[in-house]
Amino acid sequence: MTAAWDILITRAEHSKLRDLNLENIPFGKYFTDHMLEVDFIDGEWKQPEIKPYQPLLLAPSMAALHYGQAIFEGIKAYNDQAGNPRIFRPLDNYHRFNQSAERMQMPAVPEEIFMEGMRQLIELDRQWVPSREDHSLYIRPFMFSTDEMIGVRPSEHYKFMIILSPSGPYYSMPMRIHVEEQYVRAAPGGVGYAKAAGNYGAAMYATAQARKHGYDQVLWMDASEHKYVQECGTMNVFFIIGNVAITPSLEQGTILNGVTRQSVITMLKDAGLKVEERPLSLEEILEAYDQGTLREVFGTGTAATATPSSAAPPSTPSPAISSRRSPPASRSAAPTTTTSPARSPSTRPASPCACPTRT
């Protein structure tokens, strides 16, 4: 195992922060001064190093470019009221990262490299954590195969990295959602539960088609019948019908086991709502809307965070949640699925859901 004191640190000579305003910063466009990098060679993880953020030198024959062995995670850090960076549930992301690695036939990353590397990297770039309420430091751990070869087999060499990005909200406006009934994101037995890069690339075509018609994202349905809700492009989804919060279940392995999803389930139960993780059909949702029992629709995710939705006004020219089916006129103003900036540090869950960057 690699101990914390084994991480080599090379500091950047000059900080890019002096040329950047952290107010109203877009999501995922700017990156901090340093990055973590460590290679897997000859069956073992080598020396982890934190170094200045810089381009990588990669071979055109690198396996990840051809066969897609690449996974990642998304984590956030916020400053607490004392100005110290705190990471939201990083151990959950670590465990999910290695579940993805197993499914993609990649080596597990040791906890010491993942967690301590993240902690030291954030500590080094702690001035990059935005202080604005709806902003955060987005943390991107990722791993990809680095064998220089053409041939379909698992790579023998890999690179694990962490980069940091000060970011504003991923979504700043209510979202209009299109129910996707032709293309599918995942099927039972596939890699839907893994945070594999290819899952996101494969979703881009359907999302682009939805945007041509004025929608922001797609709501994926099951692969067999196109009947049951799965997840949204960048979010898990919740529907509050009556006094019950319903979210699609995980047992088929077709949706991501979201860390924010788990937090929201806990918070809903603490608030006294019954939570059901089960198959949920589009017809059940529309029927609840017609009957006036569909109270809220919202999405959850690290990038997207979570917020309740509002109903689209009757004058809305097209439904906020749309499908290719022809719903009755009474369904033409379906709820708008929205996401919003993260809560302020004072209203975020307390220490059980947050891990300080200092031990």
Image (cartoon, rainbow, N blue to C red):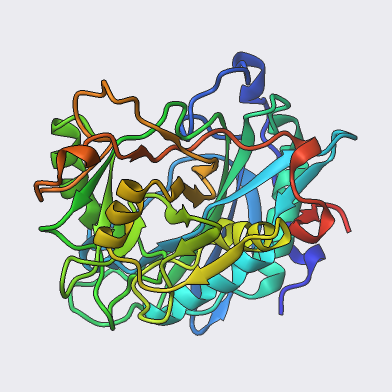
- Residue nearest the observer in this picture, 242 or 41: 242
Tell me which residue sits at (19%, 71%) in the image: 223
Rendered view: 314 above or below 269: above
Quarter placement of the C terminus: bottom right
Rendered view: 189 above or below 162: below
Tell me which residue sits at (69%, 60%) in the image: 272
- Residue nearest the observer in this picture, 231 or 81: 231
Q: Position of residue 11 (x, y in %)?
A: 71, 39
Quarter placement of the N terminus: bottom right
Which quarter of the figure has residue 95? bottom right
Q: Residue furthest front?
A: 291
Rendered view: 24 above or below 345: above
Which quarter of the figure has residue 164? top right
Q: Position of residue 292 (x, y in %)?
A: 39, 46
Rendered view: 82 above or below 263: above
- Residue nearest the observer in this picture, 263 or 316: 316
Residue 125 appears anywhere in the view? yes
Q: Is residue 48 left or right of residue 192?
A: right
Q: Position of residue 137 (x, y in %)?
A: 63, 38
Q: Position of residue 94 (x, y in %)?
A: 61, 68
- Residue nearest the observer in this picture, 100 or 160: 100
Tell me which residue sits at (19%, 23%) in the image: 317
Residue 33 appears anywhere in the view? no
Which quarter of the figure has residue 47? bottom right
Tell me which residue sits at (33%, 72%) in the image: 254
